[in-house]
Amino acid sequence: MIFTLKTGRKIEKPAQFCVATKACGRWNHQFYKSWQGARNEYKSVKSHLNNPDMVAYYGLEDVSFLKGE
């Protein structure tokens, strides 16, 4: 599937879903074949964004759930 990453770049990966995490000004993209795996990662990072200690330690800024085209 083809993904349009948060940086604007298009990439083809053998996956269905992507979780994009922004930390310290940089985007990190992780690709998953299953919806369940991607959803678990997204919920985990999203919960860390609500914890000020985790945000300060990892420098978390944002998280996004992307689907392939």
Image: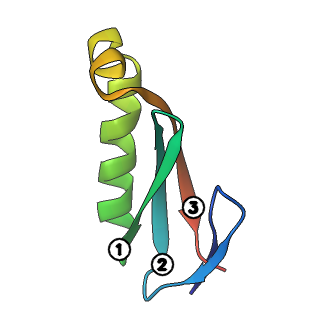
Q: Counting other residues with Cα less than 10 Å from the Cα at mark 2, is it few (<14), some (14-19), or many (20 or more)?
A: some
Determine which of the numbered discs, if any, sits on residue 2 in the image: none
User: In this rendering, would 34 be left or right of 18?
Assistant: left
Asked if 42 appears above or below 54 in the picture, the reply is below
Callout 3 amino acid? Leu
Element class at badge 1: loop
Callout 2 amino acid? Gln
Element class at badge 2: loop
Asked if 5 appears above or below 49 in the picture, the reply is below
Q: Could you say where residue 18 lies in the image, as x and y percent from the top left?
A: 47, 64
Q: Mark 2 near mark 1, Cβ–Cβ under 8 Å?
A: yes
Determine which of the numbered discs, if any, sits on residue 16 in the image: 2
Q: Which residue does the image show at 53% across and 54% down from the upper left?
A: 65
Q: Which residue does the image show at 48% across and 85% down from the upper left?
A: 13
Q: Counting other residues with Cα less than 10 Å from the Cα at mark 3, is it few (<14), some (14-19), or many (20 or more)?
A: some
Q: Marks 3 and 1, Cα distance to the nearest angstrom?
A: 12 Å
Task: Decide which of tag 2 and tag 3 comes sooner along the chain.
Answer: 2
Q: Quadrant of residue 8?
A: bottom right
Q: Could you say where residue 2 lies in the image, as x and y percent from the top left?
A: 62, 83
Callout 1 amino acid? Ser
Q: Could you say where residue 66 lies in the image, as x and y percent from the top left?
A: 57, 61
Looking at the rendered image, the quarter that the C terminus falls into is bottom right
Q: Which residue does the image show at 31% across and 28% down from the upper left?
A: 58
Task: Decide which of tag 2 and tag 1 comes sooner along the chain.
Answer: 2
User: In this rendering, would 53 be left or right of 55?
Assistant: left
Determine which of the numbered discs, if any, sits on residue 66 in the image: 3
Looking at the rendered image, the quarter that the N terminus falls into is bottom right
Task: Decide which of tag 3 and tag 1 comes sooner along the chain.
Answer: 1
Q: Marks 2 and 3, Cα distance to the nearest angstrom?
A: 9 Å
Determine which of the numbered discs, if any, sits on residue 34 in the image: 1
